[in-house]
Image (cartoon, grey):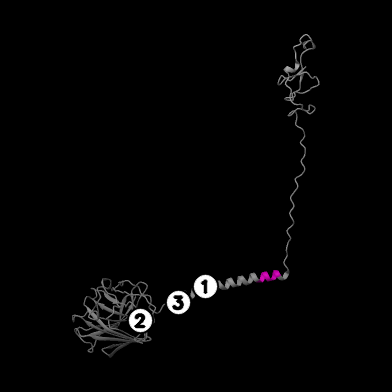
Amino acid sequence: MKQCPACNRTYTDDELLFCLEDGTPLQTVGRASDAPTALDSAYDPNKTLAFSPARETSPSPANAYSPTPVSQPPAQQSWSPPVPQYTPAPQAQAARKSGGKRWIIIAIAAVLVLGIGIVVLLSVIIKPGTANWNPATTNKSSSSGSMNANRSTTTAPPAHFKDDFSTQNWPTGESAYGSFYEGGEYHMKGKPSIYIYMFPYNKATYISRDADVKVTARSVDGNPPSNGYGLIIHGKSNEKRNLEGYGFLINNNLPAKYKIAQFVDGRLTNMVDWTESPIIGTGTTPNQIEVRAKGSQLSLYINGQFVKSITDTSNITDGSVGLYTTETNEVAFDDMEISR
């Protein structure tokens, strides 16, 4: 009899070598005398045996050793058809190259045209010399004090223009130092120790280059400002917003007189000092101040009579017409006329 030392199963078949359950080598147990005798008729060896289905006993039990692994055949690589390589003909290559160069040339030309267009546009926008850059706020000069209120425009000046001051083309109110319209006239007052000047809203219409400019001016109470009032020619505000141009001024208090001044960066310089003139009406009498500008020549007329000419030496030949006064004495302007 044989017995499995692992599971203690017994086998009567002496030819078995391994346990049919777990493959453990069987051991021989018991003696011949231990076997049941014929007297023990109740002995049935099959009652103590648990038979499993028949299996092959010749192979070695599982996990008893590690056999040499069977080499697997190499995996078969998938096959892809080769991609045909296309080599364009020399003519096609040349055409492609020429086409690429053509697009590069077109792109460069487009960039150049765009750049030229931008330069031209900027030159038109910022082109100086026509006095169209008009600040819309009031301004005091650094030395004697001045005020300027204007609106910008690009309208070409007419050949002949009249302003009878029935329409508000000039600044008014507190921002214009109390200037106002009344009775078809434009009224201005100065301030102590400073001068005041006004530019119209549409300065392009009032350009004084090569123009004949007339305006009627009067003292409202017969006590005119001692430092004069009158007409600005070729006027403008510089980058510091100070007055530049020429002033043709009168003082119609006895003795009545006139002077011609130049403004550079707000500073006043007399080109013609106060000069007495009997043609200037005194008191509240209106006086017509006229300036004829032709190139660098500026000629002053009062009440239709020639008074004085000056030659511009500062190359100030362009700008706008303006109105000017000093001190606190009220003056009024009427019937402006500009001819070219």
Q: Name the residue under label 1.
A: 115
Q: Which label's residue is closer to the chain start, 2 or 1?
A: 1
Q: Name the residue under label 2.
A: 205
Q: Where is residue 157 in the image (x, y as percent from the top left)?
A: 37, 83
Element class at badge 2: helix
User: For the residue marked with disc 2, what is the amino acid?
Assistant: Thr
334 falls in the magenta region: no
From this viewpoint, which residue is outermost toward the bottom?
305
Q: Position of residue 272 (x, y in %)?
A: 29, 84
Q: Is residue 316 left or right of residue 217?
A: right
The quadrant of the image that shows the N terminus is top right
Report, in whole angstroms, how far the alpha carbon at label 2 lies from the one at label 1: 33 Å
User: For the residue marked with disc 3, what is the amino acid?
Assistant: Val
Question: Which span of residues is magenta-colored?
Answer: 92-98
Element class at badge 3: helix
Q: Which label's residue is closer to the chain start, 2 or 3?
A: 3
Asked whether the residues under the numbered discs 1 and 3 touch, taking CB atoms below 8 Å apart as contact, a structural biologist would say no
Q: Is residue 62 left or right of residue 318?
A: right
Vertical side of 215 occupied by 72: above or below: above
94 falls in the magenta region: yes
The quadrant of the image that shows the C terminus is bottom left
Q: Name the residue under label 3.
A: 124
Report, in whole angstroms, how far the alpha carbon at label 1 lies from the one at label 3: 14 Å
